[in-house]
Image (cartoon, rainbow, N blue to C red):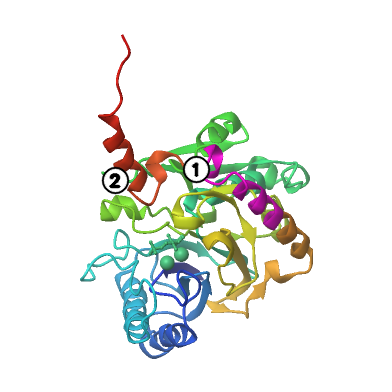
Amino acid sequence: MKITLSVIKADIGSIGGHLTPSRHLVETVKSHLDSQGRGIVIDHYVSHTGDDVAILMTHTAGTGDEDVHKLAWGAFLAGTRVAKEQGLYGAGQDLLKEAFSGNVRGMGPAVAEMEFEERPNEPFLFFAADKTDPGAYNLPLYLAFADPMTTPGLLLSPELAKGFRFVIMDVNYTEGDRIIELNAPEDLYLIATLLRDPERYVVESVWSRATDEIAAVASTTRLHNIAGKYVGKDDPVMLVRAQKHFPATGEILAPYATGHFVAGGMRGSHNMPLMPVPLNSSISYFDGPPVVSCAAFCVHEGKLTEAVDTFAHPFWDTVRDDVAKKAMEMRRQGFFGAAMLPMTELEYTGIMQTLEALDERFTVRD
Ligand code: F6R
Ligand code: MG
Ligand code: MG
């Protein structure tokens, strides 16, 4: 059976600043899907990561389907009404367009979708991150799909040994989707050269070269390319299929023990380490740190099992301690150098305005 997994997520308002949506908001999104989703989706799962609400849906309509996207958009509108009633902060903030026009791409919400022939047993992982942007997944995907130090399956499994194809997008290009396809392992240095710049080049999808099946897909939305200015970080979602011809679940999760520095945290303008957290976690220290959650599922004829909360395992407590230390270490240098993002990525215009005002006070010495 051919099925489609669609994740559509948006920040539509949260309690106490950009921390977490209210229970009432999340329940409203859920009940919209329960009442309006019949005949459109087979199953759905609603969760939040920091201030972002994500809707995972299974169906048979393929990617970019109007009814499926409209269902999610409607659910976010219903949630936004609650956010406004409750006076939540940033109510409706990611719904950048007034009227729905066929597809939520380009309207604010982040989207990650994949269609595939369902295996008899089909494990997959759903990642959601807050206070960061899509490039945050570049390193974990590179390590899981191209590095035998992380994924011994690349040596041990003849199928994995055939390698993976990376589809990488230039997210600064706004006229359309500017992409490049590169093959691991032959193109490893080329892949690394692009992925080292996560603000510009983002992994859009990964494909098995043994079977030509889709392995992973991530959202590539750049809100500031839609709105013309920064309206918040593009907190990314991702789907990754696991086991057999794909990396094992543990190989896909292992890179998150690094707590790599990503763009995000306070005012969307700082480099902070990415902390793996349990599902439905909130935000705290320095409007961060950037967090990533991961729900593991099996899907059968479109029906989802219950979610397993991968980062709730005690192993990740040590990682969280390390990441918290890394975060505080970076914060010791305040606004200086690597702690703050480069000019083009700052979410606020204050520094640019100050620099413009200072420009005329500069003099060139004889
Ligand atoms: C939002 C974020 C926060 C805000 C900060 C200030 O995702 O990262 O750090 O940027 O709380 O928010 P405003 O300017 O809305 O008061
Ligand atoms: Mg927010
Ligand atoms: Mg967010």
Residue in the foreground of this view, choosing between 320 and 2: 320
Decide if residue 246 is in sight here: no
Q: Is mark 1 within 8 Å of ligand 3?
A: no
Residue 334 spot, x, y in % from top left: 55, 47
Q: Are marks 1 and 2 in contact (CB under 8 Å)?
A: no
Q: Is mark 2 within 8 Å of ligand 3?
A: no
Q: Going from the N terminus, do you reach mark 1 or mark 2 first?
A: 2
Q: Residue at x 47, y 75 (%)?
A: 16
Secondary structure, magenta segment, majority class: helix
Magenta span covers which residues? 323-339
Decide if residue 83 is in sight here: yes
Q: Is residue 235 above or below residue 53?
A: above
Crowding around mark 2 (Cα neighbors within 10 Å: few <14, some 14 to 19, many 20+) is: few
Crowding around mark 1 (Cα neighbors within 10 Å: few <14, some 14 to 19, many 20+) is: many
Residue 161 spot, x, y in % from top left: 69, 42
Residue in the foreground of this view, choosing between 86 and 226: 86
Q: Residue at x 42, y 89 (%)?
A: 31
Residue in the foreground of this view, choosing between 78 and 350: 350
Residue 86 spot, x, y in % from top left: 37, 86
In this image, 176 relative to 285: left or right? left
Report helix, strand or loop for mark 2: loop
Q: Which residue is mark 2?
A: 176
Residue 150 spot, x, y in % from top left: 73, 46
In the picture, the disc for residue 349 is none
Q: Which residue is mark 1?
A: 198
Report helix, strand or loop for mark 1: loop
Task: Give the mark toward the camera: 1 or 2.
Answer: 1
Amino acid type, callout 2: Gly
In this image, 52 relative to 104: left or right? right
Amino acid type, callout 1: Pro
